[in-house]
Amino acid sequence: MGISECKTLIANAQQLARQRELKWDTPIDEEGNIFKEHRWNLNALIGTPPPPLIWLGTTRITANAEKSLREMCLQRDVPCPQRLFLDGHWLDFYKAIIINELLVKKNKLSHVNSNIAKIIRIIGVVNQAHQPWEITADDVRHSYNVALGVGSSGKIAANFEMVVRLVFDGMQIADTRPLAQYCLPYRDRQNAQNKVDERRIHERTFRQTEGVRTKLSERKSSKSLPDKRAFWELVEIIFTEPPKTFADFIRFRILQLCIITGLRIGEVVSLPADCLRWRSYATKDGQPAEKEHGISQSLTLKYFAEKTLTQHHKSSVILSENIQHVPPLYAEVVEDLVQSTLAATSVMRSNLEQQIKRNSLFPDIDQSALIPAYEAYARVTGNITVSSRPVNQELIALYRAHYQESALRDIYREQEDNIAARGIDVTPQIRSLHTRWREHVDVFDCHGVKVEGRVSWSNAYFKVYQIEAFLRKYRRDKMPDWIPGTLHNGSPIYPYQHLFLMPVRALGEGRNGGITDLLHYYAIGKSSASDIMLMLDGKRKDSIFARYRPSIAEDLAIKTHSFRHLQNTELMRLGVADTVISKRFRKDVRHSASYDHRSLFEELQHIEIEDELVNELSERSQILFKMIKEKQIAGPIVSEFYKLQDTVGFDDAITYLQTEADGFHVTPYGVCLNAFTVDTCPNHLECFNNCKHLARTKVKSEEDNLRKLKRRLSSWIDQIERQPIDVRPLGWENQLTHAQTRLDAVQRALDTKPGQKVSPNGDDLYDGGSLSNASILDG
């Protein structure tokens, strides 16, 4: 029964939690949020370093799910659940699923958090009157329709069906099974279901590389390639525009490497600082290889590969080293990108290393020391503007030209001199900072005497240990990255050993042209793949497109993974062997087909034809022969070609092909392989009307055309049959017979599987005679 499976799952999860010193009891407030001191750090649980830093901090459904739930309850006139968060058995079940997915199944944290945890919360809240093992088909359908109203992409609803299938059905949690089949929309949510269906079609055809195409120029799964306009706008921005912020400086370099290397975004953001390796090659006698027409030096890029066998069998958090050879054309560019990034992040790298080694947020100063209020403000907020006088614009321009440490020091020194030497007041923001921590951090004068009453902020000081204690307890979401990753050999790799570092939530930089004080700011971490992906959505106000191309930003969006598809396709288009491409991107050559988006014409360009055939066949005949050779088309001409090849020989079959090369036509209802050079089609494109030359394909528009025609014919027949016979117009019998015959023919076409003839024994309406009885060479 489901209750025993559910309780066993919870008991096993509780045991795993105890082994990792997690408190199973997690008290929640009236809003369903877990109290901070009882939250689980899921990154630490599985040993995966942030970003992103993910906590088990709430049992409440999201705001979008709450809105969808209330709307559906109102529309269906049913009471809305009183609680919008989990408790009791549902809370235990929720935590058990997370433990099981992370520690037993070893799924990635981002996947569990985004695709599973949210769904379990929706199901639990909507069906809080039942226990997890008691949910029924109606419960599932009701919850599914709530998920349909969340977001506009259909992703939540698509994930909902997956969770029900894998968790409640697959793990035998529910007493009533299977339940996934009841993920059905209510009538008023059909439009949302259509989006889910469209999403599934796209995802399921992603790896289908043999789909029938209607044009030689049509590409396979072209949606996986980047949008043309968005791609070239992005290229122009990141390669020619000066970055407006330090964060953009890092993002631009990440995106440049994504385009140049074709690596996944997660592989680029996790590059180690020592990622470059120069290799030297020599002849047997020790001479440079270039003297024997070889290559003397080559540059390789070390990275941590995703989707490896190691991660699949052991853990998703183990970093597996791999290398990619950098083409000589891009070697200098890649080396410059890496070196400039190392230079710009050197001070952050050093500070982060010392933080980890000394276990201190401020390792460069003694814990008992007093620091000026303006310095504390810069260290805690990251805002370098500590005086009431704005930063000199010339210094800002100098810094943003190359983001060098020396220019940043000049800026801070000027701000410090404004206060110490020129007597300029400190920024008023320091007072608001003290308001947040006044109960935990005391104000002192320069002699260490506690100040009571009115404070002169230009002469105010704070003690380091009090600031650090406050940040550790109350700013846990704004802490530096200290958690190391684990290499394949078991040794750790710390965040400061990665190439791309960023200030954590330094919000002042994007406001009013602010500058982040990278010299003193305490919260430093690795760059985040999610941050890069969000920056490429033009509809977001803070995206790269919105800030650099504001007039057209809303029309621009791009996915980082499309760069990988683009580079694979371009290499295939240029004739590079898939075995060579696989060495650059993956271990298994079979996966290359998923990244092949060449048009049929581009594929045919690399199919070799014997020299004598090139001279014998016309250009159109060569294309037709290549398509037959690669089994890209089928039909009467193809069948006749193979028949002649088997009976009278290859040469005669080629002669026939040259004669019939014009007989390849794409119709709204399928493919016709017949020649109409002399006479036009006698069926007037009514190919479905018992013509033996019509063959079905997988093209969706073809199915739509047939169904549209079926509805139209059925409507005509209904109109005739609804009329009394005595008032029907003259000739209604012929009209009814004509419509019924064609309706039967359309239904026969719909019932025909792709690749098969609709009417194999039908009429041959071609005036030139039947190809099935004799070939054109029989005379």
Image (cartoon, rainbow, N blue to C red):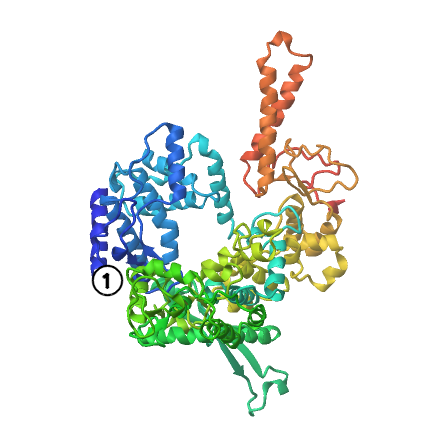
Report whether residue 523 is seen. no
Left/right of residue 720 with respect to residue 246 in the rendered view: right
Q: Residue 140 versus residue 499: which sits nearer the camera? A: 499
Residue 313 image position (x, y, % from top left): 35, 63
User: Which residue bears the numbered disc 1?
Assistant: 20
The C terminus: image quadrant:
top right
Mark 1 nearby-residue class (10 Å; few <14, some 14–19, many ≥20):
few
What amino acid does circle 1 point to?
Arg
Please, which residue is most extreme toward the top here?
A: 726
Q: Which residue is at a point 55% across and 90% down the rendered structure image? A: 284
Report whether residue 207 is seen. yes
The N terminus: image quadrant:
top left
Numbered disc total: 1
Please, which residue is most extreme toward the bottom here?
A: 285
Residue 476 occupies which quadrant of the picture?
A: bottom left
Left/right of residue 33 with respect to residue 672 in the rendered view: left
SS label for mark 1? loop
Q: Residue 480 versus residue 574: which sits nearer the camera? A: 480
Please, which residue is most extreme toward the right here?
A: 678
Residue 519 image position (x, y, % from top left): 44, 73
Residue 509 image position (x, y, % from top left): 49, 62
- Above or below residue 692? Residue 501 is below
Q: Residue 124 versus residue 678: which sits nearer the camera? A: 124
Residue 462 image position (x, y, % from top left): 33, 69
Left/right of residue 700 with respect to residue 155 in the rendered view: right
